[in-house]
Image: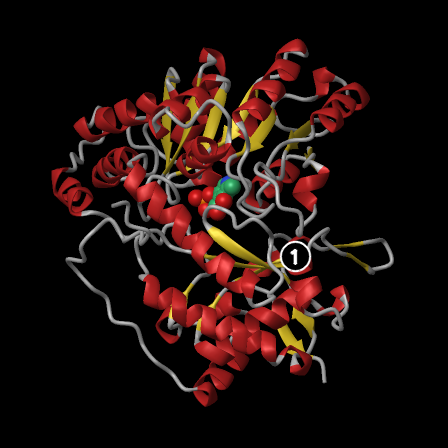
Amino acid sequence: MNPKTIIEPFKIKSVEPIRFTTREEREILLKNAGYNPFKLHADDVLIDLLTDSGTAAMSAKQWAGIMEGDESYAGSRSFYKFEKAVNNITNMKYIIPTHQGRAAEKILFSIVGGPGKYFPNNTHFDTTRANIEFTGSIAEDLLTEAGMNTQKRADFKGNMDIKKLELFIKEKGAENIPLCFLTVTNNSGGGQPVSIQNIREVKELCSKNNIPLFLDACRFAENAYFIKKREQGYQDKSALEIVQEMFSYADGATMSAKKDALVNIGGFLALNDEELAMKCRNLLIVTEGFPTYGGLSGRDLEAVAQGLEEVVDEHYLEYRIKSVEYLGNKLVEAGVPIIEPPGGHAIYIDAKRFLPNIPVEQYPGQSIVCELYLEGGIRAVEIGSVMFGKYDKKGKLIPSIMELVRMAIPRRVYTQSHIDYLIEIVLEVFKNRDRLRGYEITYEAPMLRHFTAEFKPIN
Ligand SMILES: Cc1ncc(COP(=O)(O)O)c(C=O)c1O
């Protein structure tokens, strides 16, 4: 027999209680948080789907690694373990630890960025875009049309549009494009995967123009599992083999280990170019620390090394991808508009279709995020005009292309009954959608405003 039920591939050894609150309590808590769930105390959240970043449950072996950590300032044994584990997946020559993904981005773009430079990507994540723009460079998203269509079901909606990339290189000049990026999976575009074929085609075009290709590799293992399931010729390859092939087309990578390395903190830069690696290491010493710890403790490096091994386990990956798909399919069956097909780490509600009566200037995504908390203590995040909106010279909002609400699923943290509860809450909010209100911003920071913005409901 081939059982249909996919079970969590672990037993639970240690548990953390979650706190139940009433709707009345949550109304006060949310108001005090300026209607921005980023500002809530985590203890006041029942199911926290704000992010899948740094929220994973570590394994017994990772916790054992924490005890094994060598805290020597230079040449720590844990660094060499970490280096070997990163090398095993990337096969890159220079491995530079950083305290998280954006630290790797900051170092890289401080060196290769600057005014007059352009960086294409399928879709830049917000910190990547911010680190590029901070240097005066331009960050450009070149996603395929299919990737931008939230209703279209396609296998690889994270793919870069090769024609757009070709045109972009012609227009901007290859000499002004220090690197091309591919984000796997494409977080801001719905957690959608990128195919090997697309990686290969992007690489060919980049090579022709002497542009190095980098992976934003946060969710490399989830991407590989989609390739195994969906791309012809990959069914019999192991997830690790697919991962290694993905990286074989890249000249470098930035990684937030807080995702697919199954840890709570960590990241790295992986490079093949010696001169660039030397420059990055020199800057690392100024901003992060000595090159064999780079902003991490020895125990963190141990946990990353172990996590990178565990994440390519196919029982884990099957459970991971299938549990997100389970949530997505239940919502679709009930008519809730989400990005289809479900992505790897999160379900993205299409707020424009969920709340067609609330104009983008009143942030429909924020309205859903607030209601999910009020209805069931669930914390999700707006990925739309709050996160990516800009203003024109007259102060009018230039909205984001998509208005989404992301419910990111932490790795190995919640069980199926948590997910069933979540489904019940989303359906209740959907049923009562006509009662939802728009929001206006009452405070915002000049960059990455979604983290600290404050709102007020529009009556
Ligand atoms: C695709 C992508 N790139 C970069 C980052 C930044 O990583 P970190 O949060 O570790 O700085 C993230 C984090 O969510 C991400 O999803």
Of 177 and 55, the residue lying toward us: 55
Question: In the rendered view, would you say 444 is above or below 196?
Answer: below
**Residue 36: image location, x then y, percent:** 55, 70
Quadrant containing the C terminus is bottom right
Q: Is residue 111 left or right of residue 24?
A: right
Q: Mark 1 and ligand 1: say if the CB distance to the nearest ligand atom is below 8 Å.
A: no
Q: Is residue 117 left or right of residue 291?
A: right
The residue located at (20%, 64%) in the rendering is: 15
Instruction: Name the residue type under label 1.
Output: Gly
At mark 1, the secondary structure is loop
Residue at the (58%, 29%) spot, across then down: 181
Q: Position of residue 327 (x, y in %)?
A: 46, 59
Q: Residue furthest right?
A: 394
Any part of residue 220 in sight? yes
Residue sitting at x 39%, y 18%: 92
Residue 256 image-quadrant placement: top left
Task: Give the farthest residue toward the bottom.
Answer: 24
Which is more toward the observer, 366 or 390? 366
In the image, taking residue 5 as reference, residue 356 lies left or right, namely right
Q: How many marks?
A: 1
Looking at the image, which residue is at 26% across and 29% down? 82
Which one is nearer the viewer's eye here, 265 or 52? 52
Q: Is residue 226 above or below residue 424?
A: above
Please, is residue 315 above or below residue 179 in the view? below
In percent of width and height, residue 28 lies at 49, 85
Kindly tell me whether residue 282 is visible in this rendering.
no
404 w.r.t. 174: above or below: below
Pointer 1: what residue? Answer: 384
Label 1: how many Cα within 10 Å (few below 14, some 14–19, many 20+): many
Percent x, y for residue 340?
59, 51
Q: In the picture, residue 123 is in which quadrant?
A: top right
Q: Quadrant of the N terminus?
A: top left
